[in-house]
Image (cartoon, coloured by chain):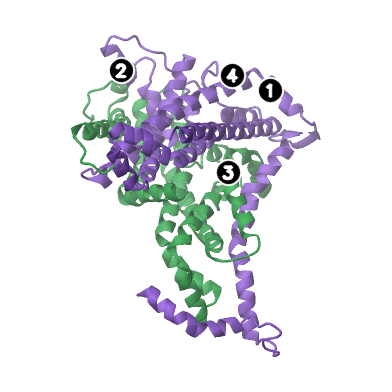
Chain colours: A green, B purple
Amino acid sequence: MSRRPGFLVYGLLLAFVLGSAAPLYWSFLLGSHTAQVAAQGVPPLLPGGHFLDNAQRVLDTVPFWKALGNSLLVSSVTAASVVFFCTLAGYAFAKLRFRGSVPLLVFVVATMAVPTQLGVVPMFILMSEFGWTGSIWAVMVPWLVTAFGVFFMRQYLVDAVPDELIEAARIDGCSQIRVFWHVAAPAARPAAAVLWLFTFMQVWTDFFWPLIALPHENPTIQVALNQLQSGFFKDYSLVLAGTTLATIPLLVLFVVAGRQLVSGIMQGAVKG
Amino acid sequence: MKIDGGDTDTPRVSPPSASSTPTPADVPVRPTLRQRLAAWDVRLSPYLYISPFFILFALVGLFPLAYTAYVSVHDWSLLGGQGDFVGLQNYREVLENPYFVKQLVNTISIFLLSSLPQVVIAVTLAALLDSQLRGRTWWRMSVLLPFVVSPVAVAIIFGSVFGDRYGLVNELLGAIGIDAIPWHTDRFASHVAIATMVNWRWTGYNALIFLAAMQAVPRDLYESAELDGAGRVRQFLSVTLPMIRPVMVFVIITSTIGGLQIFAEPRLFDETTARNGGPDRQFGTITMLVYDFGWQLRDLGRASATAWMLFILICVFALLNYYVIRRIGLLGGDDR
């Protein structure tokens, strides 16, 4: 409803946004005080000067840099793989006519409803057979393609690439693969960027499978946080400094690409 | 411009494209190699493009599903591998395990506490965002902020915020004269705390989906409602809500699939070293039971059986949701 909103609307929104930001501030706040201060309940509401000390203790306690590198590698490689394979398949479903395309697409959409965790046991057995348990490859494999990716790219490409353009390119003598590469792929770029972002975040925040597949000394960032928190005596200044550190990369991504993320979520909603 | 060009092009170039698939009556000459290659290109390319996806998908998506069923009817130890076929023995053992029912109830309780308030708040938030705000993009991005925090980080932060002795929430409650709540030990309180984590992370995300749906509502519907004398609230109830119902189905079903699998939040909320959802498993969930059976008790057979039952639970809830929403939808349709 397009009306000029009043103070009440701004006030409620502001309250919601403060509520969204407060837990992150709390994390940084406790992470910036000494262990003694953090253990005694609500600290002074201004950050203390011990964040870097606590961060150093995080680095001494868990293999943080290794975890960060692992998470970056796994998330970006799988996101690239999802974008490539799902754009290719999504294009075929959106624009090419072939026998079985409708049932196959329905099948892909149906599997989106199947929980990923249902497959952990066989995935673990499979990775053991390949001898990949404990290695970073084991974490990548389940994410190489997603049903959501195909569906998302198909929905976008149906409208983004006019049929006339494809026909014109075909008539000019383009082979199918050149039509894909020179007509469809450039048109798919905005959706591909959103899909990349989504997959990156999904893999980055995934916990269940990396917890099973990776050993203590070769963790992803989520598994490293889990180790940090599992100490017998809970030192919240240490744990929350680590949590803050681990959240920074995605915050940076959010600042850089938040706009695309918002428009991607909103586009997916109307078409989905 | 482009469309004009396309239209004038079509008649000029359609004859050669028709001749690339010659009928016997048309041309008696065999098609040239080039033409046959082009025909094969058209026919095979789609399969070529979808096959990498389907091959990988079969390996990482379909095979695990089917194989879980196979593992669940065998004795199967984490270290020793496949044992004897045992039929439904694993399922029986899981069902007889006292923790199964308890963790099933926990899962459903946490799910209900997180999904119902979340949809209400998200729709309200979307209605607030669906106006001519100054700095529109900034507000939209701001409500999405919690989405970039991983569930593990959310659980650690809220574990501290909901601390039993010195947590922020209890300190605030104390300031207004309410006794401290044992967030970790009390069963219902722990469910509320965990549901709060889920709500915090997902409400803004779902609000954006609702916002998109609201903006797709044709504006003239509001105009005619206004002419009929409907106030803002009435317009929201009689125009906006019915129009966004399909998106609501989508949001509720996806949050059912995600919500019933909850794992990271309850696992990291537990401050004891066992990490099974509290000393009495008062906030343990079904997925935590899968982990417990498989990787703590090292029994992959029972872990698979539990995973299958989780799958069935999700299907039942998704269908139930769909049915309930359709019923409400029908009633709403009669009303108009």
What type is the residue that disc 4 sits on? Answer: Lys
Disc sitting over residue B286 in the figure? none
Q: Quadrant of residue A64?
A: top left
The crowd level at tag 2 (other Cα within 10 Å; few <14, some 14-19, many 20+) is few
Chain letter of mark 3 equals A
SS type, badge 3:
loop
Q: CA distance from mark 4 to mark 1?
A: 11 Å
Q: Residue at horizontal 48%, vertical 61%? A: A158
SS type, badge 1:
helix
What type is the residue that disc 3 sits on? Answer: Gly
Q: Which residue is mark 3?
A: A134
Q: Report whether residue B126 is seen.
A: yes
Judged left or right of residue B57, residue B212 is left
* Nearer mark to the viewer, of 4 and 3: 4
SS type, badge 4:
helix
Pointers 4 and 1 within a single chain? yes
| Spot occupied by residue A246 in the image (x, y as percentages of width and height) | 38, 39
Q: CA distance from mark 3 to mark 2?
A: 39 Å
The crowd level at tag 1 (other Cα within 10 Å; few <14, some 14-19, many 20+) is some
Q: Which residue is mark 2?
A: A40
Judged left or right of residue B202, residue A103 is right
